[in-house]
Amino acid sequence: MEELNHGYPNSSRVTEFILLGFPGSPDFQLFMFILFLIIYILAILGNLSTILLVIKHRHLHTPMYIFLCNLSFLEIWFTTASIPKILAIFLGRSRSISFSGCILQLYFTFSFGCTEQFLIAVMAYDRYLAICYPLHYSTIMNTTLSCKLALGCWLGSFLIIGIPTYLVTTLSFCGPNVIDNFYCNLDSWIQLSCTDTRFIELTFFFMAIIVVIGSCMMTLLSYTYIISTILRIPSTKGRQKAFSTCSSHLAVVIIWYGSTMFLFVKPSKETTLEKTKVVSIFNIILVPLLNPFIYTLRNREVRDILRNVFPT
């Protein structure tokens, strides 16, 4: 990198990047294309169904379902930010992506991921109020406040991610342009740049602490109080009823943070790039697929609606 930097000071010669994706035979690539396409369609349909379900039934117009509706809307765009390009790579149509296209993919992927972090934390706070302060819940967490919190998650995320994205646009790329991944991420930009990236790395590190660790701590603190409150309920039936109101969200929390922590807090330098790719795929496409099914299968109100729609 030092030689490249000396050879082309203050210049940006790379106009496009090549995404390697996953290696494999043409048959394997075709199999992966079909698999990813099916999962992508199911994820879109599942989350879209959740949104339509909440909009159609008035008794679901509550803070919890407003947050769920926002989460489903987010998942649709989170997968769409990268999956179409991944499908094109599997088909062998085009592995190249323009400089501006890579920047936009980086910005939207990270912005949607950041929004999901905030939404999950806010939903944990909502469950905390519902279980720990049931008598005051409706006055504290009303529709207006829930809409403001959801809007704050969206605006805050897109503004925060704008900072490292802008810093990336100031980098120079005058050498290799091959990204050993299936989408544009910050690590790839840093590795390929022939200019000093220490300031960007430091900025991203502090922002990751604020977003990931901050939202994780809020979620963990909320569930600490939730579990403590549930354990103090004298009757078994009461404990089960209280736990059922947050079990679906807790399942989403475990899945999301399990994969996110692997990506941002890697256990060692020996962690292979292939493992990182697999976990990234899990985060980008499988989590959006699982979320609507988790909320559908573990939520009594949604199950009752589905029984009326599809009577057995």
Image: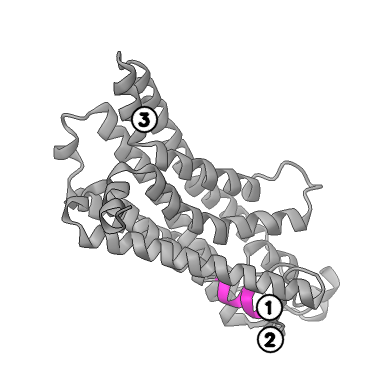
Viewer-side residue, 152 vs 54 = 54
Say left or right for 101 vs 227. right
Residue 90 appears in which quarter of the rendering?
Answer: bottom right
Image position, residue 199 (x, y; %): 62, 58
Per the model, the C-alpha gap separating discs 1 and 2 is: 6 Å
Q: Residue furthest left?
A: 139
On whether residue 276 falls in the magenta region, the answer is no
Residue at image location 27% in from the left, 58% down from the top: 309
Residue 120, above or below 49: above
Residue at image location 31% in from the left, 42% down from the top: 300
- Mark 1 touching mark 2, by CB under 8 A? yes
Q: Secondary structure at mark 1?
A: helix
Image position, residue 216 (x, y; %): 48, 40
Viewer-side residue, 143 vs 16 = 143
Image position, residue 87 (x, y; %): 62, 76
Image position, residue 112 (x, y; %): 46, 62
- The amino acid beneath tag 3 is Phe
Residue under circle 3? 243
Quarter of the rendering occupied by the N terminus: bottom right
Circle 3 crowding by C-alpha within 10 Å: few under 14, some 14–19, many from 20? some
Q: Secondary structure at mark 3?
A: helix
- The amino acid beneath tag 1 is Ile
> For residue 93, which numbered disc appears in the image?
2
* Magenta extent: 82-88
Residue 54, above or below 214: below
Residue under circle 1? 89
Residue at image location 79% in from the left, 47% down from the top: 269
Q: Is residue 155 visible?
A: no
On whether residue 86 falls in the magenta region, the answer is yes
Lower sequence index among marks 3 and 1: 1
Residue 215 appears in which quarter of the rendering?
Answer: top left
Q: Residue furthest right?
A: 3
